[in-house]
Image (cartoon, rainbow, N blue to C red):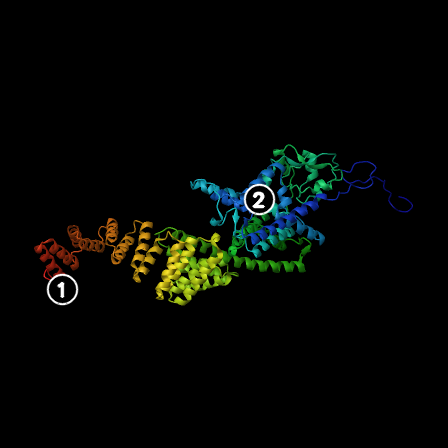
Amino acid sequence: MSDSGLIQFASGTVRPRGYRDGPQSAPPRPRPLKYGKWRALALSSVYLMFGLHIAHWKLNGSTLAPLELNEVMYTLEAGVVTAGFLLMATLFLATALVGRFFCSWACHILALEDLCAWLLGKLRIRIRPVRSRLLLLVPPITLFYMFVWPQILRIAAARPAPEFRILTDKDGWASFVTTDFWRNLPDPWIAGLTFAVCGFAVVYFLGTRSFCFHACPYGAVFAAVDRIAPGRIKLTGQCEQCGICTAVCSSRVRVHEEIARFGKVVDVNCMKDLDCVSACPQEAISFGFTRPGLADSFSSTGRRRLKYDFSRGEEWILAVVFVAVLLVFRGLYTAVPFLMTLGLAGIVSYLTLLLLRLTNRSDVRLNAFRLKRDGRLTRSGRTFCTAMLAFGLFFLHSAFIRYHEAHGQRDFEAVRAAVDQPGAPLPQDSLRSAVRHLEAAHRWGLFRPRVRDQQLASLQLKGDEPARAEPYLRRILVVDPDDADSRLALARLLAHSGRLEQAEAEARLGLAALDRAGAAEREPALSTAGGYALLGAIQARRGETDRAIAAYTTAAEENDASVFLRMTLGDLLADQGRYAEAADSYRQAASLEPGLAVAHFNLGAALTIAGDADGAIEAYRETLALLPDDVEARSNLALLLAKRGDLGVAAEHFRQVIELRPDLARPHFNLARVHDALGDPAKAEHHYRVAAQLDPAYSGRSRSN
């Protein structure tokens, strides 16, 4: 000990780990991230392209369909080749060549995640990544569920593989070009909420790029393909193992360790954002092509024992909560999308574990907030518990709603399947059950989605009390006055209840809505024709036959393949005494459906009155070819033949009528007349007598009178 009383130590050189000996007096510093600005520009351009895409649709009326990667499911399950499938195929091939560049340079969700991380950094809020065994399994399990499991079910059910085809815009939901940009996209507020959860909340609670690592199924695809990609971050200089590359990596890759062991980065989490390349003080690494090293990519994550944040028991609790949140919130109110639910499930399961830790640990932290210190709840802890209690009540309410939604949807599908099978009876139990469950969800829910109003209106119209559909239809029309289907359904309901004036007004509004929609977004032969037919039926009930005829004529022009429209128009024309026009309408109906006996019969009747006996005879013969036992058709044919002078053939037809209906007086009387004309008074007298016995009105009638 020296005179000063201080302990003297031998001096030495203190260096950072891996810092080489030499004249330097300070550890190396990272270079500016020159690629960061380019990547930020690329990610920003993604949203700029979104805006330009929407603007093109607004200005042009039609545009390329939104490039949604989930449309791959349509292709794999239904064989429909979509724009989203082609994008996914392109990205698949690109990833197999250069690795996961798309994720960090063009993914809109990752852009939001990185923006959130940058904002939190500016606010000096430190993000702590959550390490969980379970959450790492979510992307591959989700990938299996979305794309592989449906194929397994198809094979198990012995269904054939789908045939690939391309749909047009008239087919609606999966064409390359569309006039309805939002056809498969969520409402703007749902999209915004999805971005908030998956792009911001996930980062704050679970760490940078956590949605990519813990939820995204497409990331799982790209990670798998990245294993065979020759494009890699590789060693091209003298690495000093300073660790700066690892420090700047937002994807949590141990870059310096990978470089030291393999001479390249083989970790599939590497998204090629090139921050490590920019920051390297020695410029020792760069992107280039090398041997993929498939086996190395597996050993990269398996060579070191990772330290997780949760015990195995806690992981099981996290798994249960994750699945529960997924089951309750996915599709809730027909609005919450699957990927948003995955992000929400990860957040809620983690926060639930923190809540449980408050019961058995003395110190608990949520990022910068100390929830519990020295065994006592802090103010932040009490706020956290209150928020979790409120969320718990919301969760229970949502579970109640989701229970009724799921059961109601199941029964609704059973009813719709029966409707789609002509002649199949409606399953009344399923119909009543669907109404009960969906009305419960509707009554107690926090929101009333339009699709539930549509389902309940449809069910009520098929039930015993169709009038109960009216409030649902009116609520739909308040939200969307141009919903032509709902407008016409309301018109039918009003007509059924006798409110004909209101029904006609609604029918005209429905037709106007169809006209505004344009032919590209509807089936003119079905919807417009049906609207005019409804208008004609209402006008006919109001006694406005001429207007009804005009409406049905328009309907028949819109749908020239409808037998019903031709028959109804013929009936209206016949009621007005326009038999020649009626005959034309019946003739068109008979040509459309040659096996429809009533069309041939009505044609015969109209032609008879119009004075075309030969045409009427041919029509009645067509009727009898289909219905040999039709007494009225045979009687009418016999009369026409008798008037034309074919007495023998007429007599034979009258005899067949008598065999079919021996209780009718008129055939006996007409046959007696024919026998009179044939010069057979004995037979004529016999049938005169039988006719008088069957109907006193024919008594006293004989050959003499």
Q: Quadrant of residue 688?
A: bottom left
- Give the quarter of the figure containing the C terminus: bottom left
Image check: 579 left or right of 158?
left
**Amino acid type shown at disc 1:** Pro
Residue 23 at what x, y percent from top left?
83, 37
The type of residue carrying mark 2 is: Tyr
> In the figure, residue 375 lies in which quadrant?
bottom right
Bin the neighbour count of mark 1 within 10 Å (Cα to Cα): few under 14, some 14-19, many 20 and up. few
Identify the residue under disc 2: 218
Q: 703 or 394: which is nearer to us?
A: 703
Q: Nearer the viewer, residue 154 or 309?
A: 154
- 163 vs 53: above or below: above
| N-terminal label among 1 and 2 | 2
Question: Circle 2 — which element?
Answer: helix
Residue 359 is situated, as x and y percent measured from the top left of the image, at: 62, 55
Q: Give the percent coordinates (x, y) of residue 254.
A: 68, 40
Q: Secondary structure at mark 1?
A: helix
| Label 1 sits on residue | 696
Q: Nearer the viewer, mark 1 or mark 2?
A: 1
Is residue 145 in view from this perspective? no
Distance between the alpha carbons at the discs numbered 1 and 2: 89 Å
Q: Nearer the viewer, residue 170 or 464?
A: 170
